[in-house]
Amino acid sequence: MIEEWKLTAKEGLEGEASGILLAVSNARIALTIRELLVSWNCKVDSVACGLEALRQLESANPPGIALLGMDLAAPSAVEIAWELGRREDPRRTWLIMASADPGLEPKRAAIECGCDDFVALPSDPMELRMRLRVAERARSLMERAQKHEDNGRFHATHDGLTGLWNREALLSLIFQETDRVQRMKTELSLMLIDLDGFSRVNHDYGYEAGDDVLSGLANRFRRQLRSYDLIGRSGADEFLLALPGCGRDSALALAERIRAAILTRPFAAGNEATTLTASFGVAVSRGRSPLTVLGEAERALDDARAAGGNCARCASGAALVGVQAESGERKAG
């Protein structure tokens, strides 16, 4: 029967199916299915035990489709499906249960454990081919839907120009971080950054050049920050940073590094280049309401602007960072 099943296949999947995990303990059936899948241009990885199948399905890069024999042991195919279904991963593998028993009980078990399809073994190769095509198309639809969802979520929480957090999303994260500060008694500082006289860039070079400058500025910010620091665009030319574990002195030291990163290298603006400066306002949280701390940072920023720009002020005792320079930008050749 197996040889007849093997020889009836005349056409391949033409590359439609790929990344298939074949987990069947019966060596003869597994070999027959593997040869059939390979003839359909499928990339197949074969295992003979449930433990190895589960390990691959739980890996960082799991197969797109898994054909699990219901004769697997320790854990069984049903137990594997239950375990994967419990995690509610939208990108999980498409599971096809396979059983030499075409009766009602294996089908009922496959349905109850949450698998995606069922096939009897040995089966008509064209039926298996059709089920694999359905699996590929279903996964393609799910991946596209997930991509659209991810893109929508990203655009809802990030600034479209710089890719940084937008103000609303960043404030939500700051509230969460403040809760952690209150529990753990750790430090948190907020920093506002405002470009001095940035409107002149748009006026002199155009808005497209101004957008390029802002995008380049966001990249300079990223190079100065730790992986867990939070940064967002809070206005046309204003940025907000939340710095976990960072007290007054550390925040002011970071402001100096960012100030130097902005000042010391010109930004491309059309066919020319322009040098910018920025003003900084810093406030320390101490677990207080983020809105209160943000208000203090705004007042500190106003003090930095009033001092001529290109400097930083802290709400808890004014502090000047670096050498105060002329406000605005200076053009470089």
Image (cartoon, rainbow, N blue to C red):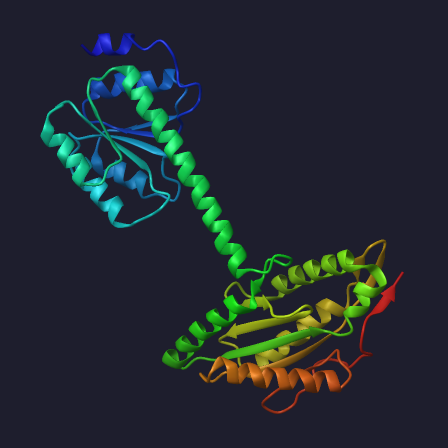
Depicted 213 relative to depicted 102: above or below = below
Task: Name the residue furthest right.
Answer: 333
Q: State the count of labels.
A: 0
Depicted 233 relative to depicted 128: above or below = below
Identified at 40% across, 27% down, the residue is: 18
Q: Is residue 75 visible?
A: no
Identified at 83% across, 65% down, the residue is: 203
Identified at 31% across, 44% down, the residue is: 58
- In this view, the residue in front, 320 or 119, is 119
Residue 162 position within the rendered picture, expressed as x and y whole percent measured from the top left:
63, 59
Q: Is residue 261 left or right of residue 82?
A: right
Q: Quadrant of the C terminus?
A: bottom right
Q: Is residue 217 left or right of residue 120?
A: right
Q: Is residue 34 left or right of residue 262?
A: left
- In this view, the residue in front, 319 or 42, is 42
Q: Residue 76 falls in which quadrant of the image? A: top left
Q: Residue 182 falls in which quadrant of the image? A: bottom left
Q: Residue 104 falls in which quadrant of the image? A: top left
Residue 72 position within the rendered picture, expressed as x and y whole percent measured from the top left:
17, 32
Identified at 18% across, 37% down, the residue is: 111
